[in-house]
Amino acid sequence: MAHVICGGAAGQRTPDIQTQKDLKMAYTEKFQTLADTARAQVDEVNPQDVDALIAAGAVALDIRDKEEHDAGHIEGSVNISRGKLEMNVEGVIPDLETTILCYCNAYNRGALSAATLRGMGFKNAKFIAGGLNAYRKLG
């Protein structure tokens, strides 16, 4: 199955591994600990499994800000920014049994969102390992 990324400017560069490491190092220790704890609490989905899961009814949930989503996202994904997730998710995904694949650019916000959704009763909230950056590398 072809991986489809919508949006994004031509020639847009995905951060390389060193840049991603630099970004991770820029996070505070407390934030990173919180994100790591969330990652340990929820299941991650391999990027190569995303298309099949979506075809089977999973919802890809882009939790990045609107301008990030507009710049490029997984085709068919729903966008609810992390800051409005708890307030808006039930209006968009009312079924607590739905498989939800949270993603951001890499790991942290996706994992935090999946953990939040699990806490709200969404039993099948997961996050995409490596986020949109990893998904993009497949296609």
Image (tube, rainbow, N blue to C red):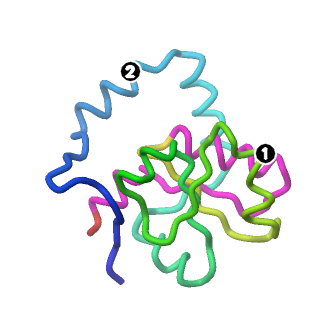
Whole-percent x, y for residue 46 in the image: 46, 62
How many marks overall?
A: 2
Residue 88, above or below 82:
below
Whole-percent x, y for residue 39 in the image: 60, 42
Q: Residues within 10 Å of mark 2 (few under 14, many from 20)?
A: few
The numbered dot on residue 53 is none
Say which of 20 and 10 sits in front: 10
Q: Earlier in the sequence, mark 1 or mark 2?
A: 2
Mark 1 belongs to which amino acid? Met
Q: Secondary structure at mark 2?
A: helix
Q: Residues within 10 Å of mark 1 (few under 14, many from 20)?
A: few
Report if residue 127 lies within the magenta region: yes
In the image: residue 83, left or right of residue 79: right
At a point 59% along the width and 45% down the height, the residue shown is 81
The numbered dot on residue 25 is 2
At a point 42% along the width and 45% down the height, the residue shown is 68
Residue with the mark numbered 1: 87
In the image: residue 2, left or right of residue 121: left
Whole-percent x, y for residue 1 in the image: 36, 83
Q: Secondary structure at mark 1?
A: helix
Mark 2 belongs to which amino acid? Met
Highlighted magenta segment, given as a residue range: 108-137
Whole-percent x, y for residue 113 in the image: 65, 45
